[in-house]
Image (cartoon, coloured by chain):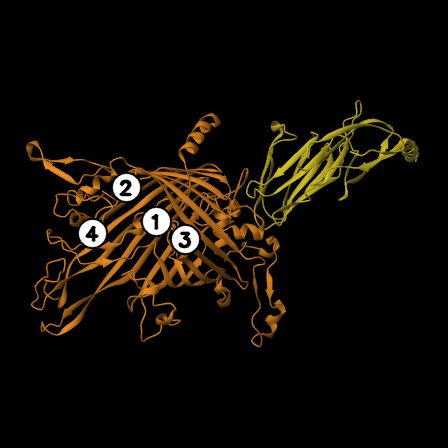
Chain colours: A yellow, B orange
Amino acid sequence: MKLAVAITIVSLAAFAHAGDLSGKTAASGGAAVVYVEKIAGKTFPAPAQHFSIDQRSLMFQPHVLVVPAGSTVDFVNSDTVAHNVFWPGVSGNRKLSHNLGTWPQGEKKSFTFDSPGVVTLLCNVHPEMSAYIVVSPTPYYAQADAGGNYAIHNIPDGNYTVTVWHEGGKPASKTVAVSGSTKLDL
Amino acid sequence: MRRVLTPFVLAAFAVIVFAPSKSLAIPAFSRQYQTSCSTCHLDFPKLNDFGKAFKDAGFKFPKDDQAFLKVPPVMLGAPAQKQMWPNVIWPGTIPGMPPIGLRMNNFFQASSTNANRFSQLQPAGTPPGTVGGFPFVPRTDFESGFFSIFTAGNFGSDIAFWVDDDISVSGDNSAGGLGDGYLKFVNLSRFLKLPDNAIALRAGRFELDLPFTQARSINISPYDIYSEANIGAMNSLIPMQQFVNNQFGLANVANGAEVSGGHLYGGYHYSVAVVNQNTSAISQSANTSMFFPSATGGANGGVGFASDANFKDIYSRFSYRINLERDSASRNAVQAAGATGPRDHTYINFGTFYYYGRSVQRLSGVLSNGTTPAVITGREPFYRLGGDFSFNYRTFNLFGLYMYGHDRNLLPIDAAGNLIVLPITSSSALPAGFLSARSATFDGGFVQADFLVHPWIMLIGRWDAVNSSADRINGLALAQNTSFPVPFHSMRNRYTPGVQFLIHANIKASFEYQIRPQQSVTFVTGAGGLPVALAPFRSNAATAALEFVY
C-alpha cells in the first residue's frame, strides 16, 4: 500500500514537470527519427520489452526501428529462404560490427543494443535488403510520420540536444529548452 | 590481404579493355522479385545453390513463391475456374511485367606476335586475306560481341518457359540466332504420386543437360571438348584413312524433348532426351522441300526441317551430389547454414553422360553392278561417353569432365570392292558401298578451378585437352604435303588462367589468357638427322571482355 502511494506521488510529480516536444522535420526521402541525446548525469534502465524485426518477402520489416539503448531486438525469419543479419558497424564505428549468422524459418535470434547510434542491418545473401535500428541514448524519441511530423511525449522540462536522423541523410542536432509543450522544427 | 589485392585489382583493370562472353543471367527475375542477381548467381551466370533450386522449381522460389513476387502475376482465369475444368480452360498466369532481359558484350584480344606464321602453309607469295589464303591475324583487335534478348519465367501450374536469342553477333549486319526456346513442365511426378520433382518434361530447343553448361558458362572461351566434332580427313598420303563427317558437338543446341528429375543442389539428378539428328549441321531454313511442307510450309516462307536423317539421337545423364555438412537440416536445405550466413554447400558431385546417334553420309554412286546410279548412304553410329565431378568448399569450386568420342568409320569402296582413295574427286571410281575400318575416336576434357576471392572477384584456372585422330589427320592434310606434323595436343591443349570482376552485380569485366604449346609449320633435318623446327609460333591469345545485362 505504501509502495503504491509512493509510486503515485512520484508519477504525479513527474507528470507535473513533463512536457511534449513536437515539430516538423525537413527530412525527405526516408523515415525520420528524432531523439534526445544523452543527458548528463542521467541514466535510464534498459526496457524489459523486446523489440522485433522480421525478415519477410526478402525485406526487413519494419524498415526503420527506433529503440532506447539497452533494448533487446528479436530478429525473426519468416521467409522460406535462408537469411542472415549483420551490421558493419554502429554509426560508422566498425568495432561494433556483428554477424548473427543463420537461422531457419520461424526461429529468431536476439541481440541487445547497448551502444547508441544508427545500426544498418544487411543480409549477406540478399544484398538488396537493408533496414535501420536507431538506438536512442534516452527513452525520449519518436518516429516522424509520412508528413515529417513528430512528437516526443513526457520529456521533463530542461535543456536538451535533439537529433534528427533520416535514411540517406546525416544526423543533425539542435539544442532546445523544453518547458511544457514545446515546438521545434528540425 | 587488402594491400596485396589493391595493386592486383588495379593492374587487372588496367589490362582489361572490355567485354564478356556468350553467357546469360536473368534480370527479369531481379525485377519481378526485386532482388539482386547475386541471390541466384555467384559470378553471373554461374548459379549458386539457391539459383539451382530456383531453376529446378521452374524459375520459381522453391517454396511460397507468391510471397516473394513483388510484381503480382496476371491471372489468366480465376483459380476457382479449376473446379469447372474440363468445361473451361485451366487457369494460368503470365508474369506481371514482360520478363525481358538484355545482354551486350564486347571483346578485346591480343594475339601472339608470331601467330601469322601459320600462313607458311599456303603457297609462297600468297598474301594473307586473299581467297584461299589464310586470314591476317592482327596483334590486337577490338571485337563486337553479342547483343541478346532473353526471357524466362513461369506460367503457373508449374509450367516454366525460356527463350533467348542473339539479335546480332559480331556487329553490323550479322544476324544472330535463336538459342534455347522451350517449355518445361515441372514436377509432373505429383500426378503419379511420386516424390516431388521426380519427373519434369522439357520440350523445344535447348542445350543438352550437360554436366557444366556451355551456353551459360562464365568463361570467355568455350570448352574445347564440347565443340569437338569428329570430321575425319580424306588424305591419301597417310595410311590412317578416315571417312567421317560428323559435325555434332556436345554443346550444340538440340531440338527435342527431355525427361528429367531430381535436384541440382543435392541428391540425384537425371535426364533422358530424344533429339533431332543433324550431323551434317544443315541449317533449318535451308532444308526445305518444294513438294512436302514442313511444320509451317518451309517452301513458302515458313520453317524448314531441322533433321538430316530419320534417326533420333538419345542423350542421358545421371549425377549424384553429396552435401557434406554434418548437420542434417543444413545438409538437406537448399543452402547450408554457415556461421556467418547461408552459403553454398560443401559438396562432391559425380556424374556420367552418354550420347548416341548415327551420322549419315550420302554419296552419289552406283549399285553393285557398277553402272546403275544410286545414292549410297553410309550410317555411322557414334557415341559420346563421359564422366564428371565437382567439388565445392565454400567459395572454391573444382570441377572437371572427361569424354570419349567414338564414330564408326566407313570407307567407300567401288563396285569391285576396292577402297577408293580419299578424298573422292571427279576422277575417283564411283562408290558402291562401304567397308568398316578402324573407328575415328577422340577423347579429352577439362579441369577448372573457380575461386571467389571476394563476392566480386573470381579467379579461374582451367586446363583443356582434346586428343583426336581426326584432328591429326586434318593437320596433315592442311599441311599440303609439307612436313607439318600437327602434334596431338597442338591446337586443343591449353591452360587458361583468368580473372573476372563484378563491377556491379550486372556488369562484369573478364580477362583470360590462353596458353598453348609451341608449333611450327616448317621443319628441316638438322645435325644427326633430327628434325628442327623453323619459325616456331604460338597461338596464345589474351582476351578481355566487358558484359552487362539489364
Depth order, front residue of A139/B143: B143
Amino acid of disc 3 = Ser
Could you tell me how far apart the alpha carbons at marks 3 and 4 are, in whole angstroms? 33 Å
| Callout 3: chain | B
Quick one: label 2 or label 1, which is nearer the N terminus? 2
What type is the residue that disc 1 sits on? Answer: Asp
Please tell me whether mark 4 sits on a helix, a strand or a loop.
helix
- Marker disc for residue A57: none
Q: Which residue is mark 2?
A: B137
**Label 3 neighbourhood size at 10 Å, few (<14), some (14-19), many (20+)?**
some
Q: Nearer the viewer, residue A168 or B264?
A: A168
Q: Secondary structure at mark 2?
A: loop
State which tag comes first along the sequence, 2 or 4.
2
The image shows residue B182 at horizontal and vertical percentages of 44, 61
Q: Which residue corresponds to mark 3?
A: B168
Q: Earlier in the sequence, mark 3 or mark 1?
A: 3
Q: Are marks 3 and 2 on the same chain?
A: yes
Chain ID of residue with mark 2: B
Q: Which residue is mark 4?
A: B470
- Give the residue pinned by disc 1: B388
Circle 2 or circle 1, nearest the eye = 2
Answer yes or no: are tags 3 and 4 on the same subunit: yes
Between the C-alphas of marks 2 and 1, the distance is 35 Å
Q: CA distance from mark 3 to mark 1?
A: 34 Å
On screen, residue B532 above or below B358 = above
Question: Could you tell me which secondary element the residue under label 1 belongs to?
Answer: strand
The mark nearer the N terminus, 3 or 2, is 2
Residues A3 and B437: in front is: B437
